[in-house]
Amino acid sequence: MTAQYEVRGNVAVILLDNPPVNGLGLATRKACVEGVLRAEADPAVQAVVLTGAGRAFSGGADIKEFGQPSALAEPSLHTLIRVVEACSKPVVAALHNVCMGGGLELALGCHYRVAEAKATLALPEVKLGLVPGAGGTQRLPRALGVEPALNMILSGEQVPCELLAMAPGQKLFDRLVPQDALGAAVALAQEKAAVRPLPKVRDLAATHPNADAYFQFVRNSVAAAQPRYPAPQRCIDAVSWSLSLPFEDGLRRERETFIALMLTPESKALRHAFFGERAASKIADVPENTPLREIRTVGVIGAGTMGGGITMNFLNAGIPVTLLETQQEALDRGVATIRRNYEAQVKKGKLKDDKYAARMALLSTTLSYDALKNADLIIEAVFEEIGVKEAVFRQLDAVAKPGAILASNTSTLDLNQIARFTSRPQDVLGMHFFSPANVMKLLEVVRGQATAKDVLATVMQLAKKIKKTAVVSGVCDGFIGNRMLEQYVRQSTFLLDEGCSPQQVDKAAEAFGFAMGPFRVGDLAGNDIGWAIRKRRRVEKPGVRYSECADRLCELGRFGQKTGAGWYDYQPGKRDAKPSPVVEQMLATHRAAIGAKTRAISDDEIVQRLVFALVNEAAHLLEEGIAQRASDVDMVYLTGYGFPLWRGGPMCYADTVGLFNVVQAMKRFAANPMDDGAFWQPAPLLARLVAEGKSFT
């Protein structure tokens, strides 16, 4: 049963009941239409109340139907809204908790609306590259006012009803109540049972005193802020029609726009990311009902940049943290940094003083491992060297209580080896945070050979609590993200060998949509980190070829922003990257030493070599089972590596280009004697997909 029907006196109550958020799937739409028609046919019923069971009025479209024929089957959402709107008896929407998307559009089709003050409303379609498709752009401006309606539609964010009720002249709410929207709605329905004519939002006029100037201002602002996305501009168009067109014409054009946007690569990419984020939390062999371990307290080892950022995640979520360092000076420095980060948020108005104080009250510090003996989860964030990790985990094994989860923040080291430093490898896994750890959304959860299923399930659930996008990785050098990044960086340096400048490569990557190009990222992270990794790899994997230009840079002491010089020059206290004559000369000398024949390289080739290197390495990861699914790879790169969201991630982008075309480009790169021909042999999975005419996603 997806909708319940009951009669209270002379009022029929229709309760949407499709957990978890009463999505408006086909069965729910049918049941709701049947309920309205049943109430209309019953002479004892004088009015109808529509509400939702559980913790939502309705979250809108049922995501399980996305892309399925049932999403468009009759009764469609448009049909349901028309049935509600055309009902000869008053229909009152009782809004509580959450009302989003199609749920809000349905509420706007009702004759009256009662809302709890703390309930939130949203039209989030723009986040999927769409416009609201069932009248939201035509009814909301009429009910709420043009400017607050357009702000809601363009942001896609949830807004509290008590805030919306302050909009001048709003007709969105007939009553705002502190609680029990259903009871208040039944009372209003009885009060309005005999009132005619029935009010309809569609009959209201949308007005603005200076519409042309206002819409032009918004268009200019959106074009500057979101130049890559077509949906925001189409949202502005659609809201403008609420002023300039008859209601039915505006409704028709809104629907045409919705359908056209569904076919754009940007919307496909955003929807791919939406579903990819939800899929990432599902692990094939770990049932959803796996019992979880309780995480009430957390220990963090290391008060440096990573340890401090990791600590803040748990403090923000209300979880007490014990922060351990070996030296008091380092501990004091780490706590001071945490305070400084919070104080910056307070200064910007993003955090209230009382919440700042409450978070700091959850933090305790120690120089002794004994203070971690009662922690439910302990995360080490110490220097990336296996001997250091060994010392830490042997100490933890001695003091941690039975059942405590022991996590390493390692970004490249062998987690299975780390787990073997303990007598409880089943309790060990990787929690690879990304810097700055209190900001970046990605958390790579590394599953060791012995990691227990309940340990994995517990950490995946905990990731949601600390607002991270968690992606499971198997154990390999670099896991998912950094193993792929190695190939991306190798290509960037081969491009330098062949005549590109760092700024040309960076500009091409940034024009493609990366937040930063590879050489600006290297300067930010520290070029000495990559240097140390290359030295280790040359011992462990002597067959892998690297350009030596990055080594020559490091030999000059140019480690990046922290030394004031890297691939670019930096002025003290500033992060502006200036092209460096020293680097230009170093590259010229390097090219002469290796006998390189330089050539003009197009931005298209630069982007293809960088991105397709990611794709081919990811195909190996999928073949080896290190990554569960292609969308997991995309989530890693969208949330941790600055890949452009509007392209959907490297695997989604490869599908958009066409895997046949990707492989043809790889064949051209393999024939280049300055490149690594062996690497450009298509991964078995990629070759198989091309042969079968299939895609990653």
Image (spheres, rainbow, N blue to C red):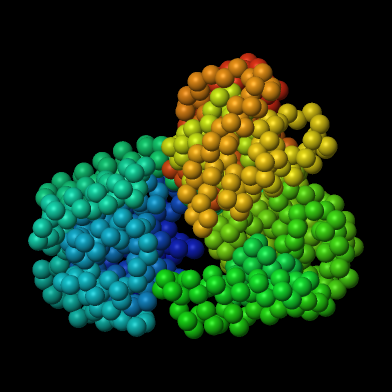
Residue at coordinates 61% horizontally, 74% vertically from top-left?
336
Q: Residue at 53% across / 19% down in the picture? A: 599
Q: Check the picture and name the quadrant holding the C terminus.
A: top right
350, above or below 561, in the image = below
Question: Residue 267 at x, y = what percent?
Answer: 40, 42
Q: Is residue 530 left or right of residue 87?
A: right
Name the side, left or right, on which 435 lies relative to 448. Answer: left
| Quarter of image, res 394 | bottom right
- Considering depth in this image, is 66 or 429 the residue closer to the camera? 429
Q: Position of residue 496 (x, y in %)?
A: 59, 29
State the count of labels: 0
Q: Is residue 620 above or below residue 678?
A: below
Residue 69 location (% of width, % of height): 41, 41
Q: Is residue 608 visible?
A: no
Apparent side of residue 320 relative to residue 82 in the rendered image (left or right): right
Q: Is residue 7 left or right of residue 478?
A: left
Question: Can you say whether 72 is above or below 604 in the image?
Answer: below
* Quadrant of residue 148 within the rendered picture: bottom left
Q: Position of residue 585 (x, y in %)?
A: 58, 31
**Residue at the spot x=29%, y=46% of the render?**
223
Q: Nearer the viewer, residue 562 or 252?
A: 562
Tell me the residue at 55%/82% (across/down): 358
- From this viewpoint, is residue 151 visible? yes
In front of the other: 496 or 121? 496
